[in-house]
Amino acid sequence: MSAANLVEVFSSIQGEGPEVGTRTLFVRFGECDLRCRWCDSPGTWKRADRMRFETAPGSERWEEEPNLVTPARLLAIAKRLDLASHRWVSLTGGEPLLQPEAVASAAEILSGYGPGIFLETHGLHTEALAQVIDRIDFVSMDWKLASDVRRESDAKGAEAEPFHEAHQRFLETARAAPGVSVKLVITPASEDAEIDAAVQRVAEAHPGACLVLQPVTPHGPVQARPTAARMQALAMRAGSRIRDVRVIPQTHPLLGVA
């Protein structure tokens, strides 16, 4: 079983997506290969020398230790945080599928205690997903829009290539999971053409998936939200192609929780 490079492990409330409001144990993996303009956790972009974990559920008291974290150690931390009382264990990041063997090990050792295994991913690493999909109960993938997102490897100033093809392949593989949602973060810079293209491809790849349109939470260089009228118009247009469309903002900033 593979050890993981983690940023943190903590107990909180799911703040976004179709499972918003549910009690969740978060296992945050280190490193990400995308750069989203609104990202509120740039500390997860690089692998961490040390990780931290909450000492008791909701305590906001932390201890630290060196990376890497073995599956057995992760289970001990999760049990200390009352693993069985949660609805989900969220494997999040960063981008967890940069460490597929560690994701598989974490999912295997944390399953069977009650919570489902919930994977939060940017939705681009299809081969890595295929390695772990049989251990995942719910895939929550982002559908990145090139108007606001770049790959880490992109040359500065270069025009970003759309992510649609890679996302569609990923979603086709994600269909094997019992539950799937697709999230589009909408900013004032998001263009109708790229949103419509994403919606069409979701409808083709997995019409039964839940599509979440998430108005951006202003952060960093993104300092404004799309209007309510725009979100309603986008939801109506998407709803003509996909049955389950929801407009859900992030709630954890409102509650002041991680």
Image (cartoon, helix red, strand yellow):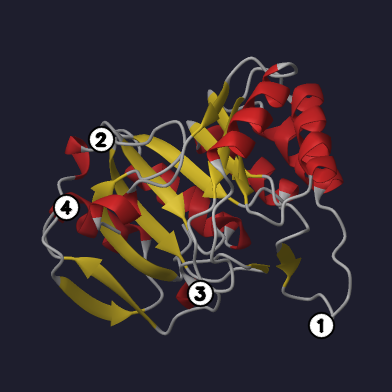
Q: In the rendered structure, are the residues bearing label 2 and label 3 in contact, judged by CB atoms less than 8 Å apart?
A: no
Can you identify the residue that label 3 sits on?
A: 42
Q: Which residue is mark 2?
A: 113
Give the class, few, some or many, for how many residues have Cα within 10 Å of label 4's Cα (few <14, many ≥20): many
Which comes before the other along the chain, label 2 or label 4? 4
Q: CA distance from mark 2 to mark 4?
A: 13 Å
User: Dot 2, how many residues are within 10 Å of its Cα: few (below 14), some (14-19), or many (20+)?
Assistant: few
Mark 2 residue type: Tyr
Tell us which disc is closer to us: 2 or 3: 3
- Horizontal arrangement in the rendering, residue 140 relative to residue 51 (left or right): right
Alpha-carbon span between mark 1 and mark 3: 18 Å
Q: CA distance from mark 2 to mark 3?
A: 32 Å
Q: In the image, what residue type sits under mark 3?
A: Pro
Point out the tag, 4 or 1, that comes first from the N-terminus. 4
* CB within 8 Å, label 3 to label 4: no
- Give the x, y percent position of residue 178: 53, 23
Q: Amino acid at mark 4?
A: Leu
Q: Which residue is mark 1?
A: 156
Q: Nearer the viewer, mark 4 or mark 1?
A: 1
Residue 63, above or below 139: below
Q: Which residue is mark 4?
A: 81
**Residue at image x 88%, y 75%?**
158
Q: CA distance from mark 3 to mark 4?
A: 25 Å
Q: Is residue 145 visible?
A: yes
The kind of secondary structure element at disc 1 is loop
